[in-house]
Amino acid sequence: MQVTMMLCDYAQVADGKLYINGGGWSLVDSHTPPSAIAMLVMVPWDRAGTPLQLDLSLIDEDGHPVVQQVDDAVNPLHIGVRLEVERPAAHPAGVPIDVPMALGIPPLQLRAFGRFAWQLSIDGQHREDWNLSFSTRA
């Protein structure tokens, strides 16, 4: 499965298209503003009609989950999306189906001068090229 991801200030999907503002950054303040992950998933033709589980977890440079405290709870940063794609009418047989997605990220408090990555897995499978890395400054 082919996946393209980009960090951006804002992303939106409308009419099957992905609209991106302030995209392509990889350096941000440690107290991040709201942001988004723009994503294009190319679902193989033979996976249409089959539910897919997409999981994004924020990890640090050592591969440990990044946690945030909300009220009294400390939780790892995780986004889960269940996706099921149907074959569009008149879509050529055997051609992957493109699925644009926009995932909002709330403001975060991360360690300054750190390296982080949103690590994607699909149905429990992970590939290194599905990591979306960024660094923080003070």
Image (cartoon, rainbow, N blue to C red):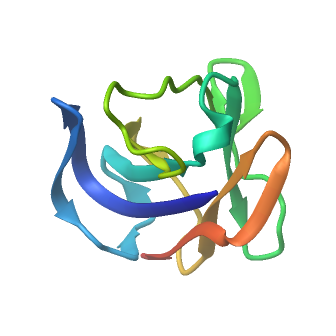
The reply, left or right, for residue 133 in relation to residue 10 is right
What is the x, y in percent for residue 104? 37, 37
Picture layout, residue 61 above or below residue 81: below
Picture layout, residue 127 above or below residue 19: below
Q: Nearer the viewer, residue 79 or 52?
A: 52
Picture layout, residue 25 above or below residue 75: below
Quadrant for the N terminus, please: bottom right
The residue under the point 74% across, 22% down is: 73
The reply, left or right, for residue 96 in relation to residue 130 is left
Q: Nearer the viewer, residue 17 or 80?
A: 17
Count the marks.
Answer: 0
Residue 55 found in image quarter: top right
Picture layout, residue 26 above or below residue 36: below
Q: Nearer the viewer, residue 14 or 71?
A: 14
Residue 30 found in image quarter: bottom left
> Visible in this render: residue 118?
yes
> Visible in this render: residue 77?
no
What is the x, y in percent for residue 47? 67, 37
The residue under the point 69% across, 25% down is: 50
What is the x, y in percent for residue 2? 57, 62
The residue under the point 24% across, 44% down is: 11
The residue under the point 33% across, 25% down is: 89
The reply, left or right, for residue 3 in relation to residue 51 is left
Q: Nearer the viewer, residue 113 or 63?
A: 63
Quadrant for the C terminus, please: bottom left
